[in-house]
Amino acid sequence: MPHTPGHKPVLSNIEIAQAARLRPIGEIAAAAGIPDEALEPYGRAKAKVALSWLHGLTDRPRGRLVLVTAVSPTPAGEGKTTTTVGLGDALTRISERAMICLREPALGPVFGMKGGAAGGGRAQVVPMEDINLHFTGDFGAIAVATNLLAAMIDNHVHHGNALGIDVRRITWRRVLDMNDRALRDTVIGLGGTGNGHPRESGFDIVVASEVMAIFCLATSLADLKRRLGRIVVARTRSGAPVTAADLGAHGAMTAVLRDALAPNLVQTLEHTPAFVHGGPFANIAHGCSSLIATEAALRLADYVVTEAGFGADLGAEKFADIVGRRGVQADCAVIVATVRALKYHGGVDVPQLPVEDVAALERGLANLDRHVRNVREVYGLPCVVAINRRADDTDAEIAALIAGAERMGVRAVAATHFADGGAGAEDLAREVVRLCDEGGAAPTFTYPDEAPLWDKMRAIAQRVYGAADVTGSASVLRAVETLEAEGYGGLPVCVAKTQYSFSTDAKLRGAPSGHVVDVREVRLAAGAEFVVMICGDIMTMPGLPADPAAAHIDVTDDGRITGLF
């Protein structure tokens, strides 16, 4: 029976994925030009690709990079990963050599509010259960490397503290790949002298760790080890920084991460090759998959579709200002929008979103307009709006969205890849090819390298968020001044803030302007080579919701997983 536009398949996402006929991963690799000897298989349907082979691709011409971003996220969901997958399949269908680069899902949101993150409907990467759960163990390796460094800090202090570490100024935190609010703030070392020195500490989620950021920005094993060694973990009693290299930890950390650094190759439901590798969140980290995977895909395909986390004010900004400064820049952007999301930003509450409301959609276009202006004018990228169409979207609402985008000077293309796979996104794929062929000015940055750190933060707030200014306590301003004095002023800024609003108040929908962005904490990520500015109430260790997704996940007696998104 044919699907109506945007119609949701009768089967659940996991049922569609489990019914799929996957090709052996060697066939997928061969289609991408990867020889069998470069593969390190993890079963029949996934493999790592050897770094030694990938390093030999540098003399090949680079393909075109398509960055998928979105409007500000809403409870209704926008389908950015689904669109990334559907667009990759559509490019293949129109006879382009395409690959996809995605972040690995984190177990925190898989078991929390969001559920799985491998796409949905007929636009998924598979094997879906593996990708959403332990996959190839990369996140476990990143957690071990992070916690090894934490253990070596406390061990050094316990055995005499030759470096003179001030235990009150240890900034390195342990991590867990799980949302667990009870571990945000902890006291460790209790139980007597044999258990170390009692001190306050805490946990972050793995995707917020600096090791994750380093993992995704490193270009080789040697670069990984260099960056790990530069991590600043504490201060001495005199205020000097203490690094992982000072503790002799970076070599072992690199050894733990050696195999994980090779990118993971999987396939879509339509057998388009996909790298799924690395996974920093864009609201608390830089939000992009690994540089190694992206660079490799650009040497293997004519078009590479990659995704930046959350809205264009977060993931796309960080792609432009952090990843772009590493020499990997997009050729065009796709901004995912839904009728539901724009009605939500126009003031409609979630229960009423299925009801036609063109007036609310028109009000919500302000959110899309700011994202379009940021992508085009701040990041310097040509773009198209991808309408991820749902069954309850009316023709009048779709027409209003298309007309609204036209007034913004961009084209909006309705796509039904969720229901129809790549066939439902062919028009979107053709528009992406047209934009890339048309070319344009080189991508731009939000701020210059030489600007002071606080001016960089202000530029992001004013140019991207529409804010009037930024504020910070005296301790925050002193921390920024210290980093400038120590030579870190040339680093880019990575803002941690809510994904739900241009402001730091998640409840402010649409396109708020004139607000003030308050920076409550500054963290140096010397190995990742950026400075994190934590704003508002954002948490680097989220909690589970009242009804977590984990409560609906199960396994049958024959080992079949159910309820996973």
Image (cartoon, rainbow, N blue to C red):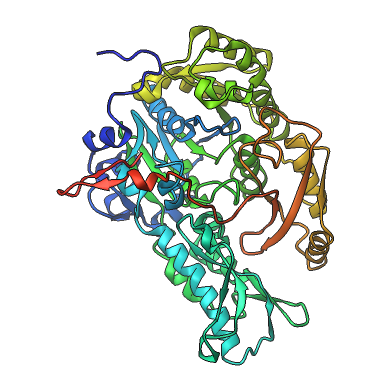
In the image, residue 67 above or below residue 112: above
Q: Nearer the viewer, residue 111 or 222?
A: 111
In terms of image quadrants, where is residue 99? Answer: top left
* Residue 373 x %, y %: 70, 27
User: Which residue is depicted at the point 75% across and 52% down?
Assistant: 519
User: Which residue is depicted at the point 43% across and 38% down?
Assistant: 100
Q: Nearer the viewer, residue 321 or 220?
A: 321
Side (left or right) of 493 relative to 472: left
Residue located farthest toward the front when viewing the structure as drawn: 546
In the image, residue 229 above or below residue 318: below
Can the viewer see residue 43?
yes
What is the number of callouts on the image?
0
* Residue 557 x %, y %: 16, 49
Q: Quadrant of the C terminus?
A: top left
User: Which residue is depicted at the point 75% across and 82% down?
Assistant: 237
* Residue 174 x %, y %: 53, 68
Side (left or right) of 325 relative to 129: right
Can the viewer see residue 95?
no
Q: Quadrant of the N terminus?
A: top left
Side (left or right) of 138 relative to 306: left
User: Which residue is depicted at the point 52% across and 12% down?
Assistant: 356
In the image, residue 402 above or below residue 253: above
* Residue 555 x %, y %: 23, 48
In terms of image quadrants, where is residue 164? Answer: bottom right
